[in-house]
Amino acid sequence: MVSKILIVEDEQGVVQLLRARLEPEGFQVITAYNGQTGLRAVAEARPDLVILDLTLPELDGFEFCRRIRRQPETARLPILVLSGRVEEVDKVVMLELGADDYVTKPFNTKELVARVKTLLRRVSTPALPRVLRVGTLEVDLDRHIVLVASQPISLTAKEFELLKVLLEAKERTLTRAFLLEKVWEYGEELEIETRTVDVHIRSLRKKLGPEGARIITVRNVGYRLETTSPHVNPASLDEEAPALE
């Protein structure tokens, strides 16, 4: 089966160079010259991998990647960033946004093709079930199943996502503003009451029973989830802790 590669790049010379190298390798190449067109191409053509520039007209590569990762149907679409931006901060930001690889210009076309093949092999290999376990708490990320002491726990979609984010943070403290953006996708430009997070945390603790004591309030900051045995009185976990602006 022929793999489709979407190139989202506004420099025609780079597009032609990539096409000339990828097509002889048996790939079908699709192109888009700005971010908005690239998003439409993802929805309509359903590529197997995206080669993405960062500096694009209409919609830059950062926002492109952010939107792709927010959609369940494209959340695991491989994205290889190809950019002239060599600053470490750009690489870190893109990898945190969900890019799978980052190659700087000028680039070696042979190496880039090898990276493309590696990413495609990774996707074609059946993934093991993604299950997070802490104490008696077990969270199946793919099937959206939560167990406490082998007993199923019914969570809302937002409660499940909130628990997932806290678990994946690995005991790092997360601010309410971060949780609002990550779970509810509210940007800083929206003045959303941060008590939304507190209400869901309170409900999540209650539903998790004894394991709910792992979710710790960090005064004036936010929340973290303890992966070691919590030495906290659950009755004291609902204290009011205003978030820092």
Image: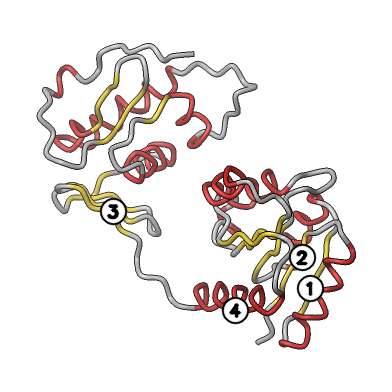
Q: Secondary structure at mark 2?
A: strand
Q: Position of 184 compared to 137: left or right? A: right
- Asked if 21 appears above or below 57 in the picture, the reply is below
Instruction: Residue under label 1, please give it.
Output: 18
Answer with mark 4 or mark 2, whichever residue precedes in sequence.
2
Instruction: Residue under label 3, please give it.
Output: 132
Label pair 4/2, CB-CB below 8 angstroms: no
Q: Which mark is residue 156?
A: none
Colour scheme used in the picture?
A: secondary structure
Answer with mark 3 or mark 1, whichever residue precedes in sequence.
1
Q: In the image, which is nearer the foreground, mark 3 or mark 1? A: 1
Q: Which quadrant of the figure has residue 8? A: bottom right
Label pair 2/3, CB-CB below 8 angstroms: no
Instruction: Residue under label 2, please give it.
Output: 7
For the point 74% across and 55% down, the residue is 53
Answer with mark 3 or mark 4, whichever residue precedes in sequence.
4
Disc 3 packing (10 Å; few <14; some 14–19; many ≥20): some
